[in-house]
């Protein structure tokens, strides 16, 4: 029985790697392949090993990162919503498997730690940085006003010279 599961998992990975390794050349292919990928993960998540999840996570990252970036300007609003739904379905499938939960737990831990770092930054350095940004903005604003005044003086001078 274990051999049959191992064969199915191997065939699944082989089929997925052959069919979804290719860089999608158009948004329709991207959407179709992303949908197929998520359906395959949902169907086979219970059989996934840690290696399968690493592979699936890399592929998922391609769909959400590099490939999405390539097509995002071509996607209509309903297609962007479809991509969001696919992302959610993948994350739910991953969360519903024991290995996926382990991966998610590590991710959650990292996010919590990052959140603590952000809170600490907000307490210690945010106000100072905001003051520095405000000071820089005022300086830029003052410079812009000075440039505009110089331009206006120049225009008036040119205008006055042209009338005489």
Image (cartoon, grey):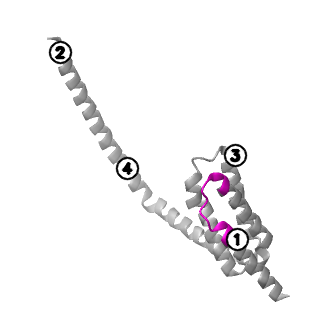
* Structural distance between the alpha carbons of marks 1 and 3: 26 Å
**Quadrant of the frame with the C terminus:** top left
Density class for disc 4 (Cα within 10 Å; few <14, some 14-19, many ≥20) is few
> Is residue 25 located in the magenta-colored stretch of the structure?
yes
**Which of the two discs, 3 and 4, labels the residue nearer the N terminus?**
3
Q: Are marks 2 and 1 in contact (CB under 8 Å)?
A: no
**Pick the front one: 98 or 140:** 98
**Which of the two discs, 4 and 1, labels the residue nearer the N terminus?**
1
Residue assigned mark 2: 162
> Is residue 73 located in the magenta-colored stretch of the structure?
no
Q: Which mark is residue 78?
A: 3
* Structural distance between the alpha carbons of marks 3 and 4: 38 Å
Residue at (77% x, 71% y) in the render: 96
* Structural distance between the alpha carbons of marks 2 and 1: 74 Å
**Which of the two discs, 3 and 2, labels the residue nearer the N terminus?**
3
Question: Residue 12, relative to residue 133: is it above or below?
Answer: below
* Span shown in magenta: 18-29
Residue 19, given in percent of the width and then of the height, sits at: 68, 67
* Structural distance between the alpha carbons of marks 4 and 2: 43 Å
Q: Which mark is residue 133?
A: 4
**Which of the two discs, 4 and 2, labels the residue nearer the N terminus?**
4
Name the front one of labels 4 and 2.
Answer: 2
Q: Left or right? Give the position of 157 relative to 71.
A: left
Residue assigned mark 1: 16
Name the front one of labels 1 and 3.
Answer: 1
Name the front one of labels 4 and 1.
Answer: 1
Residue 70, given in percent of the width and then of the height, sits at: 55, 55
Q: Quadrant of residue 162?
A: top left
Q: Secondary structure at mark 4?
A: helix
């Amino acid at each position: 029985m274990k051999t049959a599961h191992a064969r199915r998992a191997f065939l699944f990975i082989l089929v997925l790697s052959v069919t979804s390794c290719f860089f999608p050349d158009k948004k329709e292919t991207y959407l179709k392949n992303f949908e197929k990928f998520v359906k395959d993960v949902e169907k086979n998540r219970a059989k996934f090993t840690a290696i399968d999840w690493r592979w699936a996570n890399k592929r998922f990252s391609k769909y959400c990162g590099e490939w999405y970036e390539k097509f995002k300007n071509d996607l209509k609003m309903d297609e962007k919503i479809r991509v969001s739904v696919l992302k959610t379905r993948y994350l739910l499938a991953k969360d519903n498997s024991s290995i996926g939960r382990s991966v998610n737990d590590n991710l959650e831990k990292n996010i919590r730690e990052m959140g603590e770092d952000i809170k600490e930054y907000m307490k210690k350095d945010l106000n100072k940085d905001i003051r520095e940004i405000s000071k820089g903005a005022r300086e830029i604003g003052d410079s812009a006003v000075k440039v505009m005044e110089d331009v206006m003086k120049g225009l008036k001078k040119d205008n006055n010279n042209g009338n005489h």
